[in-house]
Image: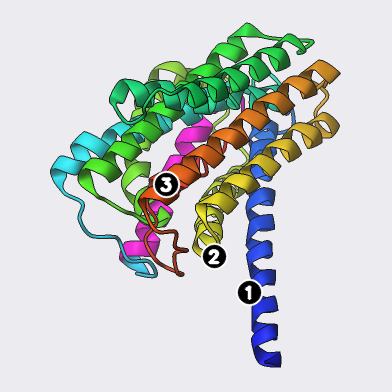
Amino acid sequence: MADRSKGFMRDEFVTYAYILLYIALSSGQIFFNKWVLSSKEINFPYPLGLTLLHMIFSSVLCFLLTKVLKIVKIEEGMTLEIYVTSVIPIGAMFAMTLWLGNTAYLYISVAFAQMLKAIMPVAVFILGVAAGLEMMSCRMLLIMSIISFGVLVASYGELNINWIGVVYQMGGVVGEALRLIFMELLVKRKGIKLNPISLMYYVSPCSAICLFVPWIFLEKSKMEGNGTWNFHFVVLTLNSLCTFALNLSVFLVISHTSALTIRVAGVVKDWVVVLVSALLFADTKLTIINLFGYAIAIAGVAAYNNHKLKKEASKVPSETPADGESISLVSQANTNTER
Protein backbone atom coordinates (compact mmCIF):
# COMPACT_ATOMS: atom_id res chain seq x y z
CA MET A 1 0.00 0.00 0.00
CA ALA A 2 2.85 2.36 0.90
CA ASP A 3 4.62 1.58 -2.37
CA ARG A 4 1.44 2.28 -4.32
CA SER A 5 1.00 5.59 -2.49
CA LYS A 6 4.60 6.57 -3.20
CA GLY A 7 4.14 5.66 -6.86
CA PHE A 8 1.01 7.81 -7.07
CA MET A 9 2.79 10.76 -5.44
CA ARG A 10 5.74 10.33 -7.79
CA ASP A 11 3.42 10.33 -10.82
CA GLU A 12 1.64 13.43 -9.50
CA PHE A 13 4.98 15.18 -9.00
CA VAL A 14 6.13 14.30 -12.53
CA THR A 15 2.83 15.50 -14.01
CA TYR A 16 2.98 18.87 -12.26
CA ALA A 17 6.65 19.20 -13.19
CA TYR A 18 5.77 18.75 -16.88
CA ILE A 19 2.95 21.29 -16.61
CA LEU A 20 5.24 23.85 -14.98
CA LEU A 21 7.90 23.09 -17.61
CA TYR A 22 5.37 23.79 -20.38
CA ILE A 23 4.21 27.07 -18.79
CA ALA A 24 7.82 28.18 -18.21
CA LEU A 25 8.99 27.29 -21.74
CA SER A 26 5.91 28.71 -23.43
CA SER A 27 6.07 32.00 -21.53
CA GLY A 28 9.84 32.18 -21.74
CA GLN A 29 9.87 31.62 -25.50
CA ILE A 30 7.52 34.56 -26.06
CA PHE A 31 9.74 36.84 -23.96
CA PHE A 32 12.88 35.43 -25.59
CA ASN A 33 11.57 36.17 -29.09
CA LYS A 34 10.53 39.68 -28.08
CA TRP A 35 13.99 40.32 -26.63
CA VAL A 36 15.83 38.99 -29.68
CA LEU A 37 13.68 41.03 -32.08
CA SER A 38 13.52 44.28 -30.12
CA SER A 39 16.60 44.61 -27.94
CA LYS A 40 19.53 46.82 -28.89
CA GLU A 41 21.90 44.24 -27.42
CA ILE A 42 21.06 41.59 -30.04
CA ASN A 43 20.08 43.95 -32.87
CA PHE A 44 18.16 41.32 -34.85
CA PRO A 45 14.87 43.01 -35.92
CA TYR A 46 14.20 40.40 -38.59
CA PRO A 47 11.09 38.33 -37.74
CA LEU A 48 11.22 36.47 -41.06
CA GLY A 49 14.86 35.56 -40.54
CA LEU A 50 14.28 34.47 -36.94
CA THR A 51 11.29 32.30 -37.88
CA LEU A 52 13.20 30.82 -40.82
CA LEU A 53 16.07 29.97 -38.48
CA HIS A 54 13.62 28.19 -36.13
CA MET A 55 12.21 26.07 -38.97
CA ILE A 56 15.64 25.15 -40.35
CA PHE A 57 16.85 24.21 -36.86
CA SER A 58 13.71 22.14 -36.26
CA SER A 59 14.06 20.38 -39.63
CA VAL A 60 17.69 19.44 -39.00
CA LEU A 61 17.07 18.31 -35.42
CA CYS A 62 14.04 16.20 -36.41
CA PHE A 63 16.08 14.57 -39.16
CA LEU A 64 18.88 13.74 -36.70
CA LEU A 65 16.46 12.32 -34.11
CA THR A 66 14.51 10.18 -36.60
CA LYS A 67 16.89 9.18 -39.37
CA VAL A 68 20.40 9.35 -37.90
CA LEU A 69 20.08 8.61 -34.19
CA LYS A 70 16.70 6.85 -34.66
CA ILE A 71 15.54 7.84 -31.19
CA VAL A 72 12.02 8.60 -32.45
CA LYS A 73 10.10 6.58 -35.02
CA ILE A 74 8.25 8.42 -37.78
CA GLU A 75 4.57 7.51 -37.84
CA GLU A 76 3.40 5.58 -40.88
CA GLY A 77 0.52 6.45 -43.21
CA MET A 78 1.92 9.54 -44.92
CA THR A 79 1.51 9.51 -48.71
CA LEU A 80 2.45 11.98 -51.45
CA GLU A 81 -1.21 12.90 -51.94
CA ILE A 82 -1.72 13.63 -48.22
CA TYR A 83 1.56 15.54 -48.07
CA VAL A 84 0.65 17.80 -51.00
CA THR A 85 -3.00 18.39 -50.08
CA SER A 86 -2.65 18.61 -46.29
CA VAL A 87 0.91 18.93 -44.94
CA ILE A 88 2.04 21.67 -47.33
CA PRO A 89 -0.98 23.91 -46.55
CA ILE A 90 -0.41 23.31 -42.82
CA GLY A 91 3.27 24.20 -43.23
CA ALA A 92 2.40 27.35 -45.19
CA MET A 93 -0.10 28.51 -42.56
CA PHE A 94 2.36 27.65 -39.78
CA ALA A 95 4.97 29.82 -41.48
CA MET A 96 2.47 32.66 -41.93
CA THR A 97 1.40 32.47 -38.28
CA LEU A 98 4.91 32.62 -36.86
CA TRP A 99 6.13 35.26 -39.30
CA LEU A 100 3.25 37.70 -38.75
CA GLY A 101 3.09 37.01 -35.01
CA ASN A 102 6.80 37.68 -34.54
CA THR A 103 6.57 40.81 -36.70
CA ALA A 104 3.81 42.15 -34.44
CA TYR A 105 6.31 42.26 -31.55
CA LEU A 106 8.15 45.04 -33.36
CA TYR A 107 5.09 47.29 -33.04
CA ILE A 108 3.02 46.25 -30.01
CA SER A 109 3.73 44.98 -26.52
CA VAL A 110 3.80 41.30 -25.59
CA ALA A 111 0.83 41.77 -23.27
CA PHE A 112 -1.35 43.43 -25.90
CA ALA A 113 -0.37 40.83 -28.51
CA GLN A 114 -1.44 38.12 -26.06
CA MET A 115 -4.76 39.85 -25.49
CA LEU A 116 -5.42 40.00 -29.24
CA LYS A 117 -4.63 36.27 -29.51
CA ALA A 118 -7.65 35.59 -27.30
CA ILE A 119 -9.79 36.16 -30.42
CA MET A 120 -8.41 32.89 -31.84
CA PRO A 121 -11.47 30.71 -31.01
CA VAL A 122 -13.69 33.17 -32.89
CA ALA A 123 -11.56 32.91 -36.04
CA VAL A 124 -11.38 29.11 -35.74
CA PHE A 125 -15.15 28.85 -35.25
CA ILE A 126 -16.03 31.13 -38.19
CA LEU A 127 -13.67 29.27 -40.53
CA GLY A 128 -14.89 25.95 -39.13
CA VAL A 129 -18.48 26.86 -39.97
CA ALA A 130 -17.41 27.87 -43.47
CA ALA A 131 -15.59 24.54 -43.91
CA GLY A 132 -18.52 22.52 -42.56
CA LEU A 133 -16.63 21.41 -39.45
CA GLU A 134 -18.68 23.45 -36.97
CA MET A 135 -22.40 24.04 -36.50
CA MET A 136 -23.77 27.47 -35.67
CA SER A 137 -25.73 27.52 -32.43
CA CYS A 138 -27.07 30.11 -30.00
CA ARG A 139 -24.64 28.92 -27.31
CA MET A 140 -21.59 29.21 -29.57
CA LEU A 141 -22.78 32.57 -30.86
CA LEU A 142 -22.98 33.81 -27.27
CA ILE A 143 -19.49 32.49 -26.46
CA MET A 144 -18.02 34.10 -29.59
CA SER A 145 -19.73 37.39 -28.71
CA ILE A 146 -18.27 37.33 -25.18
CA ILE A 147 -14.74 36.71 -26.48
CA SER A 148 -15.05 39.42 -29.15
CA PHE A 149 -16.45 41.92 -26.64
CA GLY A 150 -13.62 41.18 -24.20
CA VAL A 151 -10.95 41.70 -26.87
CA LEU A 152 -12.59 44.97 -27.96
CA VAL A 153 -12.63 46.24 -24.38
CA ALA A 154 -8.99 45.22 -23.89
CA SER A 155 -8.05 47.01 -27.13
CA TYR A 156 -9.97 50.12 -26.07
CA GLY A 157 -7.93 50.19 -22.88
CA GLU A 158 -4.60 50.05 -24.74
CA LEU A 159 -2.78 53.37 -24.22
CA ASN A 160 -0.29 53.19 -27.10
CA ILE A 161 -2.12 51.21 -29.75
CA ASN A 162 -0.23 50.69 -33.03
CA TRP A 163 -2.56 49.59 -35.81
CA ILE A 164 0.27 48.16 -37.92
CA GLY A 165 1.08 45.76 -35.08
CA VAL A 166 -2.61 44.96 -34.66
CA VAL A 167 -2.92 44.08 -38.36
CA TYR A 168 0.15 41.81 -38.18
CA GLN A 169 -1.12 40.08 -35.04
CA MET A 170 -4.61 39.55 -36.47
CA GLY A 171 -3.02 38.22 -39.66
CA GLY A 172 -1.15 35.73 -37.49
CA VAL A 173 -4.42 34.78 -35.79
CA VAL A 174 -6.07 34.12 -39.17
CA GLY A 175 -3.07 32.05 -40.26
CA GLU A 176 -3.22 29.98 -37.07
CA ALA A 177 -6.98 29.48 -37.45
CA LEU A 178 -6.48 28.23 -41.01
CA ARG A 179 -3.70 25.92 -39.82
CA LEU A 180 -6.00 24.39 -37.20
CA ILE A 181 -8.75 23.93 -39.79
CA PHE A 182 -6.33 22.17 -42.15
CA MET A 183 -5.14 19.98 -39.27
CA GLU A 184 -8.69 19.01 -38.35
CA LEU A 185 -9.44 18.19 -41.98
CA LEU A 186 -6.28 16.05 -42.06
CA VAL A 187 -7.42 14.08 -39.01
CA LYS A 188 -11.11 13.75 -39.88
CA ARG A 189 -10.82 13.05 -43.59
CA LYS A 190 -7.43 11.35 -43.79
CA GLY A 191 -7.33 9.73 -40.33
CA ILE A 192 -3.67 10.64 -39.81
CA LYS A 193 -2.26 10.82 -36.27
CA LEU A 194 1.26 12.04 -35.60
CA ASN A 195 3.38 12.62 -32.54
CA PRO A 196 4.98 16.10 -32.31
CA ILE A 197 8.36 14.96 -33.67
CA SER A 198 6.72 13.33 -36.69
CA LEU A 199 4.55 16.40 -37.19
CA MET A 200 7.54 18.76 -37.10
CA TYR A 201 9.55 16.37 -39.30
CA TYR A 202 6.98 16.81 -42.07
CA VAL A 203 5.88 20.41 -41.46
CA SER A 204 9.16 22.21 -40.65
CA PRO A 205 10.79 21.84 -44.11
CA CYS A 206 7.58 23.09 -45.78
CA SER A 207 7.46 26.07 -43.45
CA ALA A 208 11.16 26.80 -44.04
CA ILE A 209 10.66 26.88 -47.82
CA CYS A 210 7.56 29.08 -47.46
CA LEU A 211 9.57 31.50 -45.32
CA PHE A 212 12.73 31.41 -47.45
CA VAL A 213 11.06 32.89 -50.54
CA PRO A 214 9.71 36.09 -48.87
CA TRP A 215 12.90 36.35 -46.79
CA ILE A 216 14.97 36.71 -49.98
CA PHE A 217 12.84 39.65 -51.15
CA LEU A 218 12.05 41.34 -47.83
CA GLU A 219 14.94 40.85 -45.41
CA LYS A 220 18.01 39.42 -47.11
CA SER A 221 19.20 42.76 -48.53
CA LYS A 222 18.51 44.53 -45.22
CA MET A 223 20.55 41.99 -43.31
CA GLU A 224 23.42 42.28 -45.76
CA GLY A 225 23.28 46.09 -45.67
CA ASN A 226 23.37 46.18 -41.89
CA GLY A 227 26.06 43.55 -41.58
CA THR A 228 23.78 41.34 -39.53
CA TRP A 229 25.38 38.16 -40.83
CA ASN A 230 27.68 38.46 -37.81
CA PHE A 231 24.76 37.60 -35.54
CA HIS A 232 24.91 36.23 -32.02
CA PHE A 233 25.27 32.54 -32.86
CA VAL A 234 24.90 31.26 -29.29
CA VAL A 235 21.82 33.38 -28.53
CA LEU A 236 19.97 32.47 -31.73
CA THR A 237 20.86 28.79 -31.41
CA LEU A 238 19.56 28.77 -27.84
CA ASN A 239 16.42 30.58 -29.01
CA SER A 240 15.81 27.91 -31.67
CA LEU A 241 16.49 25.13 -29.18
CA CYS A 242 13.94 26.61 -26.77
CA THR A 243 11.33 26.60 -29.54
CA PHE A 244 11.99 22.92 -30.17
CA ALA A 245 11.93 22.13 -26.44
CA LEU A 246 8.55 23.84 -26.17
CA ASN A 247 7.05 21.43 -28.70
CA LEU A 248 8.45 18.48 -26.74
CA SER A 249 7.00 19.83 -23.50
CA VAL A 250 3.56 19.88 -25.13
CA PHE A 251 3.99 16.19 -25.96
CA LEU A 252 5.04 15.38 -22.39
CA VAL A 253 2.06 17.19 -20.83
CA ILE A 254 -0.52 15.59 -23.15
CA SER A 255 1.10 12.17 -22.74
CA HIS A 256 0.87 12.31 -18.95
CA THR A 257 -2.45 14.14 -18.61
CA SER A 258 -5.02 15.15 -21.24
CA ALA A 259 -6.00 17.78 -23.76
CA LEU A 260 -8.01 19.51 -21.02
CA THR A 261 -4.89 19.95 -18.87
CA ILE A 262 -2.88 21.52 -21.69
CA ARG A 263 -5.72 23.95 -22.41
CA VAL A 264 -6.06 24.96 -18.77
CA ALA A 265 -2.27 25.33 -18.57
CA GLY A 266 -2.47 27.48 -21.68
CA VAL A 267 -4.92 29.87 -20.00
CA VAL A 268 -2.63 30.10 -16.95
CA LYS A 269 0.32 30.75 -19.25
CA ASP A 270 -1.57 33.57 -21.00
CA TRP A 271 -2.09 35.40 -17.72
CA VAL A 272 1.54 34.82 -16.72
CA VAL A 273 2.71 36.35 -20.00
CA VAL A 274 0.43 39.38 -19.67
CA LEU A 275 1.40 40.15 -16.07
CA VAL A 276 5.12 39.35 -16.27
CA SER A 277 5.55 41.34 -19.49
CA ALA A 278 4.43 44.44 -17.58
CA LEU A 279 7.47 43.95 -15.33
CA LEU A 280 9.99 43.06 -18.03
CA PHE A 281 9.26 45.45 -20.89
CA ALA A 282 9.05 49.24 -20.81
CA ASP A 283 6.53 49.31 -23.70
CA THR A 284 3.92 47.46 -21.59
CA LYS A 285 1.50 49.72 -19.75
CA LEU A 286 -1.46 47.75 -18.41
CA THR A 287 -4.68 49.55 -17.52
CA ILE A 288 -7.74 48.45 -15.55
CA ILE A 289 -9.73 48.44 -18.81
CA ASN A 290 -7.04 46.23 -20.41
CA LEU A 291 -7.24 43.66 -17.66
CA PHE A 292 -11.04 43.80 -17.38
CA GLY A 293 -11.48 43.22 -21.11
CA TYR A 294 -8.92 40.42 -21.14
CA ALA A 295 -10.64 38.74 -18.19
CA ILE A 296 -13.93 38.77 -20.12
CA ALA A 297 -12.20 37.31 -23.20
CA ILE A 298 -10.49 34.59 -21.16
CA ALA A 299 -13.84 33.67 -19.56
CA GLY A 300 -15.20 33.22 -23.07
CA VAL A 301 -12.19 31.15 -24.08
CA ALA A 302 -12.67 28.93 -21.01
CA ALA A 303 -16.34 28.43 -21.96
CA TYR A 304 -15.28 27.59 -25.52
CA ASN A 305 -12.71 25.04 -24.35
CA ASN A 306 -15.24 23.45 -22.01
CA HIS A 307 -17.81 23.20 -24.81
CA LYS A 308 -15.29 21.66 -27.23
CA LEU A 309 -14.03 19.13 -24.69
CA LYS A 310 -17.56 18.02 -23.79
CA LYS A 311 -18.32 17.65 -27.48
CA GLU A 312 -15.16 15.55 -28.03
CA ALA A 313 -15.89 13.44 -24.93
CA SER A 314 -19.39 12.63 -26.21
CA LYS A 315 -17.92 11.26 -29.44
CA VAL A 316 -14.86 9.37 -28.21
CA PRO A 317 -14.28 7.58 -24.87
CA SER A 318 -11.98 9.66 -22.72
CA GLU A 319 -8.54 8.09 -22.51
CA THR A 320 -5.17 9.43 -21.51
CA PRO A 321 -2.47 8.51 -24.06
CA ALA A 322 0.44 6.48 -22.79
CA ASP A 323 4.03 7.60 -23.18
CA GLY A 324 5.12 7.52 -26.79
CA GLU A 325 1.60 7.02 -28.10
CA SER A 326 0.54 9.03 -31.13
CA ILE A 327 -1.47 12.13 -30.36
CA SER A 328 -4.02 13.47 -32.79
CA LEU A 329 -3.17 16.78 -34.41
CA VAL A 330 -6.40 18.32 -33.18
CA SER A 331 -5.46 17.55 -29.56
CA GLN A 332 -2.36 19.69 -30.04
CA ALA A 333 -4.28 22.66 -31.43
CA ASN A 334 -3.20 25.99 -30.00
CA THR A 335 -0.25 24.49 -28.14
CA ASN A 336 2.80 24.35 -30.38
CA THR A 337 2.94 27.68 -32.14
CA GLU A 338 4.20 30.04 -29.49
CA ARG A 339 6.19 32.90 -30.83
* x, y percent for residue 84: 19, 37
Residue receiving disc 1:
11
Task: Between residue 286 and residue 216, name the one nearer to us.
Answer: 286
* x, y percent for residue 98: 49, 31
Q: Are marks 2 and 1 in contact (CB under 8 Å)?
A: yes
CA gap, disc 2 and disc 3:
19 Å
Callout in the foreground (2, 3): 3
Q: Which range of residues does the magenta coloring cover?
A: 44-67
CA gap, disc 3 and disc 1:
26 Å
* 226 on left or right of 73: right
Up the image or down, 292 lies above or below 253; here it is: above
Three-letter amino acid code at the position of disc 1: Asp
Task: Tell which circle, 3 or 1, labels the residue nearer the N-terminal end.
Answer: 1
Label 2's element?
A: helix
Q: Residue at x 78, y 22 (%)?
A: 292
CA gap, disc 2 and disc 1:
9 Å
Q: Residue at x 52, y 27 (%)?
A: 120
Tell me if mark 2 has few (under 14), some (14-19) or many (20+) residues whose alpha carbon lies within 10 angstroms of its own. Answer: some
Up the image or down, 165 lies above or below 135; here it is: above
Q: Residue at x 64, y 48 (%)?
A: 265
Q: Quadrant of residue 44?
A: top right
Quadrant holding the C terminus: top right
Q: Which disc number belongs to residue 256?
A: 2
Three-letter amino acid code at the position of disc 3: Glu
Label 1's element?
A: helix
